[in-house]
Image: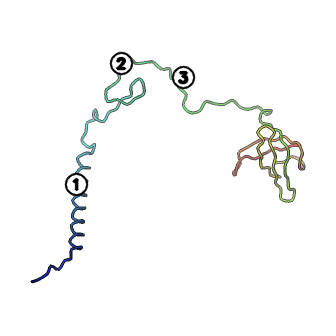
Amino acid sequence: MARSQQSFGKRENEKKKEQKKKEKVARKEERKSSTDKGKSLEDMMVYVDHEGNLVSAPPDPSRRAEVNAEDIEVGVARQRELTEEELQRKGTVTFFNQSKGYGFIRDHESQESLFVHINDIAGPINENDRVTFEKVKGTKGWQAVKVRK
């Protein structure tokens, strides 16, 4: 009596591979049948109703509303330019190292600490000095520029 050359495990693995191939072919056929190729333009058209919902039927012309193009604002509304007085803020120097050339100022309005570099200072300042400055966005966060006693 001759035995089969394949073991039970090998036959099972081959069955699994064959089943995966069949499933893959079935998925491929399903994708081919469900593509949008060949559909007419009307089948692909979608409309927006008066409430902003997507519908397949064209909108009712009797519910049409006229919109003035100048009333439509695209983007953010323009902000008015700030005056020089509004840009100036007041604060107190909490730390300043002359040898390293930097320090920090505590803003009186927001109580936040702002970085200040020696190149942005008009005249010498020391700790606990009251100063005026402008707040700008720097590379690592907010910082004070145009600092004056």
Relative to 131, 32 lies left or right: left
Disc 1 marks a residue whose amino acid type is Ala
Q: Secondary structure at mark 2?
A: helix
Residue neighbourhood size for the residue with mark 3, other residues' Cα within 10 Å, grouped as few (<14), some (14–19), many (≥20): few
Disc 3 marks a residue whose amino acid type is Asp
At a point 63% along the width and 30% down the height, the residue shown is 78
Q: Nearer the viewer, residue 5 or 120?
A: 5
Q: Nearer the viewer, mark 2 or mark 1?
A: 1
Q: Is residue 96 above or below residue 146?
A: below
The residue that disc 1 covers is 26
Q: Is residue 80 above or below residue 124?
A: above
Q: Residue lying furthest front in this view? A: 1
x and y percentages locating residue 11 in the rendered image: 20, 71
At a point 17% along the width and 80% down the height, the residue shown is 5
x and y percentages locating residue 86 in the rendered image: 78, 33
What whole-number distance in Å separates the C-alpha atoms at marks 3 and 1? 54 Å
**Label 3 with label 1: CB-CB less than 8 Å:** no
The residue that disc 2 covers is 61
At a point 76% along the width and 44% down the height, the residue shown is 112
At a point 41% along the width and 23% down the height, the residue shown is 50
Q: Return the disc, 2 or 1, that comes first in the chain's sequence.
A: 1
What whole-number distance in Å separates the C-alpha atoms at marks 2 and 1? 46 Å
The quarter of the displayed image where residue 144 is located: top right
x and y percentages locating residue 91 in the rendered image: 83, 41
Relative to 137, 122 lies left or right: right
Residue neighbourhood size for the residue with mark 1, other residues' Cα within 10 Å, grouped as few (<14), some (14–19), many (≥20): few
Q: Quadrant of the N terminus?
A: bottom left
Q: Return the disc, 3 or 2, that comes first in the chain's sequence.
A: 2
The residue that disc 3 covers is 71
